[in-house]
């Protein structure tokens, strides 16, 4: 009996070791939230009562006949815990677009492209993954690494899919392992994910840095000088400034045009610092609330918080005339591949105060790269006064 227990224990340890090793062997080279594509029209099949749709365009409609292949039991992912789907509305809901995220990994001696499909219906027809055109081009050497196979096996076929509406399927395309020296690639032959020569910089940095798309690594969470709370709001009333919170010792910066912005992108949140000018020794401000960022596809990223100050309520800041300081808004995380973003402050609720202003604001097509370059402008700069 003891021998059997020892044997089972050793087997369990061996299994755990293999699982740990398998997990360790998965290296993320790149990932992207992908393009948003029009959602196909969905109907209900009268017999099966299942929702059905036809994928409108695979770019292979005129080249290959629709096969009899119908794949089912495709692996799914828990998109609710995946940063690629942050802010994503379930595909089972009435939304006009679907995201098409992907991830490139090294697994078990191969390079694997994970293509994630949010199921718009229980049954999808006329779909396409890849064929011999699927390849990864090393742009430094000119060597192309060709697609070997797919999971499930749908290589070179237009096919149907059975699943569950609202789930996210994980289609895999397998390539030869890329050399460790490969850093600059283009992915071809996966049209439904818009990978038709898409340029990608691979993550060859330490594991605590994550790279997505073609532009940047994630930023570290920014650090700002924390203001001191002088008086906490009591029975807050927007029309009674005696009830507002009051702060001093703000995060001062060198003088730059008021309203200048900087941005930090992290996996958990997007931080937007705004330069703010003090014209008096004590001024009131209000930030956050329904402020949003919106991309060109109409995807909104909501403001979640105001760093160190009240969110969506008025507050006082003590300082000196001529001070410039940073107010930092915290938004839902942005995909790293976004090139531009629009900043929108909705019209606020009227309130009673001197020079009260509740008008909205729109700053359209801001360059994400330039916003990130502006980080240097928001270093803490202690006040210097000559009397």
Image (spheres, helix red, strand yellow):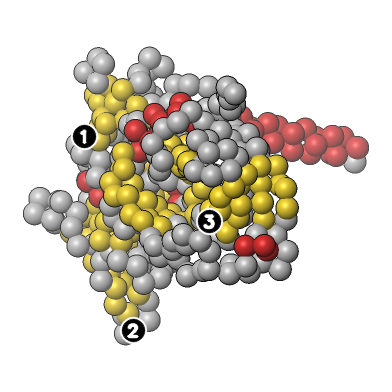
Q: Which quadrant of the figure has residue 68?
A: bottom left
The numbered disc on residue 80 is: none
Residue beneath disc 3: 286
Q: Earlier in the sequence, mark 1 or mark 2?
A: 2
Q: Earlier in the sequence, mark 1 or mark 3?
A: 1
The numbered disc on residue 197 is: 1
Q: Nearer the viewer, residue 8 or 306?
A: 306
- Quarter in which the C terminus is drawn: top right
Disc 2 is placed on an element classified as: loop
Asked if residue 168 is positioned above or below residue 197 in the image, the reply reads below
Mark 1 near mark 2, Cβ–Cβ under 8 Å?
no
Dot 3 surroundings within 10 Å: few (below 14), some, or many (20 or more)? some
Is residue 150 rendered to the left or right of residue 10?
A: left
Find the residue positioned furthest to the right.
2
Residue 287 position in % (x across, y down): 51, 54
Residue beneath disc 2: 47
Is residue 221 rendered to the left or right of residue 205?
A: right
Q: Nearer the viewer, residue 275 or 279?
A: 279
Find the residue positioned furthest to the front.
387
Q: Earlier in the sequence, mark 2 or mark 3?
A: 2
């Amino acid at each position: 009996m003891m021998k059997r227990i020892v044997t089972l224990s050793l087997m369990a340890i061996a299994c755990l070791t293999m699982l740990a090793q398998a997990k360790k062997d998965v290296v993320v080279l790149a990932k992207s939230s992908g393009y948003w594509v029009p959602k196909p029209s969905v109907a209900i099949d009268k017999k099966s009562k299942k929702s059905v749709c036809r994928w409108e365009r695979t770019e292979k409609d005129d080249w290959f006949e629709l096969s009899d292949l119908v794949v089912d039991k495709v692996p799914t992912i828990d998109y609710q815990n995946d940063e690629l789907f942050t802010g994503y509305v379930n595909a089972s809901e009435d939304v006009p677009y679907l995201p098409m995220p992907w991830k490139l990994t090294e697994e078990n001696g191969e390079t694997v492209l994970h293509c994630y499909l949010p199921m718009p219906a229980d049954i999808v027809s006329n779909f396409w993954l890849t064929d011999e055109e699927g390849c990864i081009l090393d742009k430094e050497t000119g060597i192309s690494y060709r697609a070997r196979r797919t999971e499930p096996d749908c290589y070179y076929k237009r096919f149907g899919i059975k699943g569950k509406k609202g789930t996210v399927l994980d289609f895999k395309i397998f390539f030869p392992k890329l050399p460790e020296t490969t850093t600059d690639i283009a992915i071809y032959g996966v049209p439904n994910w818009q990978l038709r020569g898409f340029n990608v910089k691979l993550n060859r940095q330490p594991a605590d840095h994550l790279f997505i798309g073609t532009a940047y690594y994630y930023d570290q969470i920014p650090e700002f000088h924390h203001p001191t709370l002088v008086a906490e709001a009591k029975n807050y009333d927007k029309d009674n400034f005696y009830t507002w919170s009051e702060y001093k010792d703000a995060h001062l910066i060198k003088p730059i045009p008021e309203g200048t912005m900087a941005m930090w992108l992290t996996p958990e949140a997007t931080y937007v610092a705004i330069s703010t000018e003090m014209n008096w020794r004590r001024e009131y401000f209000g930030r956050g609330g329904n402020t949003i960022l919106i991309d060109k596809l109409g995807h909104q990223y909501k403001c979640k918080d105001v760093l160190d100050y009240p969110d969506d309520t008025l507050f006082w800041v003590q300082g000196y005339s001529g001070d410039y300081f940073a107010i930092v808004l915290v938004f839902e995380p942005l995909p790293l591949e976004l090139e531009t973003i629009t900043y929108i402050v909705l019209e606020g609720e009227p309130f009673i105060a001197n020079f009260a202003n509740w008008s909205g604001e729109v700053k359209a097509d801001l360059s994400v790269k330039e916003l990130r370059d502006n980080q240097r402008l928001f270093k803490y700069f202690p006040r210097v006064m000559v009397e």
